Image (spheres, rainbow, N blue to C red):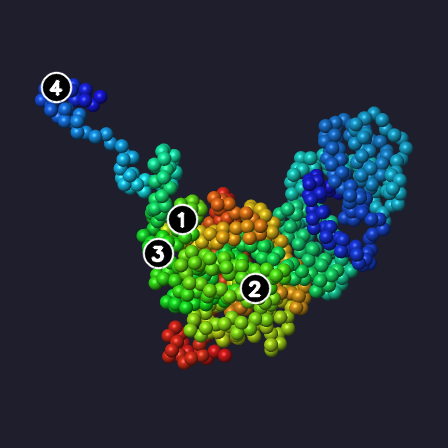
């Protein structure tokens, strides 16, 4: 289509350029450039990232990558020390941290939030995340309650409840 | 005469709080003035109506139906009112039945005087079985019910509120009788209150709290002051209840997070740290501290944790299991960790050598609602609290975090204690209403109920819940050689954030001279404070204190 348009617009003098673009212009597939794709997906918000994960298998794999979720967690806060990463990975990963703690905390604090709290939000989320990991360690030992892999353990249930107005 | 139409409250509440205490009540027969016939509701009897308590629900239903029938067929009123009285209205059940059947078949009017064979006897102050024609009274009844149809709901709620207030007054009066030693009068009050409970909604609000207090009072009266011992509950049960209390409301979370913040700040710069926890339970406080230490600038220290807890009876070493879990967590985040468990059923049985404190390490002592158990009733020289405080002092801790209930439940006078407890636990139950997660909420209520029972029904060494307010703890701790260490703005910020996460909008964090209190609608319920040991060394070595003062 592009070529016929060109032929229509530039009738005489640009025959060479049309021919060139026909040969040299490659088709651009974003999936061929995974690094660019990652850079783009890194900047998405949570909902868009989850939607993106349903596009195709490649996007799904990339969206599951923990480093993207790390960006989501620390987006509004100053960059944390590198030791945080090993701790978070040991406790279950950034995606779990985000979905289980950071997102509900951010949502709840959204109304009463002050700008200075951004870093503290993450700190608090980390602490709650750690308690959650500890309870998951307990597993069926604690009160005979079976704790599933994906469901949050009881200590985070208060975050899941809707806010009473 | 008012009968409520919410029959649901009847069914649920009688079985709940009434049955336990009434069974203990019947086992010891105290002298009763009123009871000739079992089962007659005596509050109504006082008004001149005899209804069996078991039939109350049925009668209420039938009155409803009667009301609708009367409203729908007003033409029959005049006929009913103008005839001589056929039925004995003091026996409410049969009176309603007969009126209802009459409405079902309008034209038949039996001409004889029908009396129910069961209630042949008349009650002493019965105004209805006089020889006067009861027509005017019946007429009044009918018109009353006509009016009440219009504001049916408001009558019920106003009456419930009224009953709630009456309940509180009766509780106080009963407690005063108990303090005076007048147990027979107290017992009759108890019975009245149990009857009143059936009219009040015991699912929430004052009815629920009142139910627990009535229970506790009846334990005190009938089982004696050592009888309501909570130590009957096993340590395992206590841990579970504690866990659910942790989940259901923010008090324990607030306590843990605030204490951790103080400990974290105190351990800044130290590489060898030792935390002594006076009540380990499931160890829910420590994961957050371990994580915070792992992430502190400069790397994590070597952390030793000594957890004190009750011995487990069935051979499983629960302290060790908790220690293993914590150790696994610490290993995941690369914190060098060592755990030691000390099993002791009472805190005063713990001796400092059991803790094996290394002189080179920095010690933190953490007491979440444990110190009040040491306050014996008589203040002799060797009271347990002073012993324990002195050996804590001898450990020279960098910081001691103390979290206690903010209430005055250790007064010598029973009535004062009772009143204070009623207010405190009503507020606490109010705050618990906001929690919707089951079974957390129910089990948390049982946890609180055990505290109530201990405060109200136990004395002497059985009473361990001897809460004292922050001011008294300040005096006590200052006298034992500690000085307050202000919880910083970080702790306040964290506590505020934590509260915002809880969905109920009634919690409030307040700062009180360097201590933080968490309360419900500006009534503080729990207070967290931090203390440092005043050093005996000369002032030159202690750079924190601007003013030199000798400590004892």
Asked which quadrant contains residue B458, the reply is bottom right
Q: Position of residue B539 (x, y in %)?
A: 40, 79
Seen as rendered, the residue at the extreme right is B112
Residue holding disc 3: A83
Q: CA distance from mark 1 to mark 4?
A: 60 Å
The answer to whether residue B391 is visible is yes
Tell me, yes or no, whether the two marked residues, 1 and 4, touch with CB atoms within 8 Å.
Answer: no
Q: Which mark is residue A11?
A: 4
Q: Are the residues flagged by discs 1 and 2 from a single subunit?
A: no
> Is B286 above or below relative to B433?
below
Instruction: Choose the circle earlier in sequence order: 1 or 4.
Output: 4
Q: Position of residue B436 (x, y in %)?
A: 56, 46
Q: Nearer the viewer, residue B191 or B391?
A: B391
| In-image side of B377 versus B83 (left or right) | left
Residue holding disc 2: B309
Q: CA distance from mark 3 to mark 4?
A: 64 Å
Q: CA distance from mark 2 to mark 3?
A: 34 Å
Residue holding disc 1: A93
Q: Chain of mark 3?
A: A
Q: Residue at x 74, y 33 (%)?
A: B65
Q: Residue at x 62, y 47 (%)?
A: B204
Q: CA distance from mark 3 to mark 1?
A: 14 Å
Q: CA distance from mark 1 to mark 2?
A: 33 Å
The answer to whether residue A112 is visible is no
Q: Chain of mark 2?
A: B
């Amino acid at each position: 289509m592009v070529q016929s348009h060109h032929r229509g617009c530039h009738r005489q003098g640009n025959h060479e350029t049309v021919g060139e673009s026909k040969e040299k212009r490659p088709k651009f597939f974003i999936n061929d450039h995974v690094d660019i794709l990652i850079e783009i997906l890194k900047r998405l918000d949570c909902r868009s990232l989850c939607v993106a994960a349903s596009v195709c298998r490649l996007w799904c794999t990339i969206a599951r990558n923990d480093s993207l979720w790390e960006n989501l967690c620390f987006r509004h806060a100053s960059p944390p020390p590198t030791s945080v990463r090993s701790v978070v990975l040991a406790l279950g990963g950034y995606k779990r941290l985000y979905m289980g703690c950071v997102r509900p905390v951010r949502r709840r604090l959204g109304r009463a939030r002050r700008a200075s709290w951004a870093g503290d939000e993450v700190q608090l989320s980390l602490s709650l995340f750690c308690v959650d990991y500890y309870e998951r360690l307990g597993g069926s030992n604690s009160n005979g309650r079976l704790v599933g892999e994906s469901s949050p353990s009881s200590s985070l249930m208060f975050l899941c409840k809707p806010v009473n107005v | 005469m008012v009968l409520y139409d919410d029959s649901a409250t009847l069914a649920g509440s009688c079985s709940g709080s009434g049955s336990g205490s009434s069974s203990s009540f019947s086992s010891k027969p105290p002298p009763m003035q009123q009871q000739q016939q079992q089962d007659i509701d005596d509050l109504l009897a006082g008004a001149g109506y005899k209804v069996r308590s078991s039939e109350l629900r049925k009668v209420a239903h039938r009155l409803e139906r009667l009301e609708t029938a009367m409203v729908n067929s007003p033409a029959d009123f005049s006929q009913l009112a103008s005839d001589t009285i056929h039925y004995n209205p003091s026996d409410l059940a049969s009176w309603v039945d007969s009126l209802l059947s009459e409405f079902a078949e309008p034209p038949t009017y039996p001409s004889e005087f029908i009396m129910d064979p069961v209630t042949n006897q008349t009650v002493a102050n019965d105004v209805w079985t006089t020889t006067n024609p009861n027509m005017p009274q019946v007429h009044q009844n009918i018109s009353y019910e006509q009016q009440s149809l219009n504001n049916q709901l408001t009558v019920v709620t106003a009456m419930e509120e009224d009953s709630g207030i009456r309940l509180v007054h009766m509780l106080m009066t009963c407690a005063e009788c108990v303090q005076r030693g007048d147990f027979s009068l107290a017992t009759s009050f108890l019975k009245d209150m149990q009857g009143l409970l059936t009219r009040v909604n015991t699912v929430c609000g004052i009815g629920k709290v009142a139910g627990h207090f009535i229970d506790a009072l009846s334990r005190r009266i009938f089982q004696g002051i050592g009888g309501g011992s909570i130590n009957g509950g096993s340590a395992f049960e206590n841990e579970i209840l504690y866990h659910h209390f942790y989940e259901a409301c923010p008090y324990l979370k607030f306590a843990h997070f605030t204490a951790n913040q103080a400990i974290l700040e105190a351990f800044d710069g130290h590489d060898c740290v030792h935390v002594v926890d006076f009540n380990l339970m499931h160890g829910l406080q420590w994961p957050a501290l371990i994580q915070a230490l792992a992430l502190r600038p400069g790397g994590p220290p070597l952390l030793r944790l000594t957890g004190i807890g009750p011995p487990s009876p069935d051979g499983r070493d629960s302290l060790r299991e908790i220690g293993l879990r914590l150790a696994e967590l610490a290993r995941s985040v690369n914190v060098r960790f060592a755990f030691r468990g000390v099993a002791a059923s009472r805190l005063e049985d713990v001796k400092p050598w059991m803790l094996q404190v290394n002189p080179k390490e920095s010690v933190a002592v953490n007491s979440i609602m444990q110190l009040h158990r040491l306050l014996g009733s008589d203040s002799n020289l060797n009271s347990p609290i002073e012993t324990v405080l002195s050996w804590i002092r001898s450990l020279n801790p960098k910081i001691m975090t103390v979290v206690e209930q903010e209430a005055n439940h250790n007064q010598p006078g029973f009535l004062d204690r009772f009143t204070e407890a009623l207010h405190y636990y009503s507020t606490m139950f109010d705050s618990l209403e906001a929690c919707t997660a089951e079974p957390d909420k129910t089990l948390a209520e049982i946890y609180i109920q055990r505290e109530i029972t201990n405060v109200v029904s136990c004395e002497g060494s059985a009473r361990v819940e001897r809460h004292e307010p922050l001011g008294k703890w300040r005096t006590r701790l200052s006298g034992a050689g500690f000085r307050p260490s202000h919880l910083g703005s970080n702790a306040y910020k964290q506590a505020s954030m934590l509260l915002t996460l809880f969905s109920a909008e009634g919690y409030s964090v307040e700062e009180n001279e360097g201590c933080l209190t968490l309360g419900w609608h500006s009534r503080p319920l729990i207070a967290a404070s931090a203390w440092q040991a005043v050093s005996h060394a000369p002032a030159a070595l202690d750079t924190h204190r601007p003013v030199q003062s000798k400590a004892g």
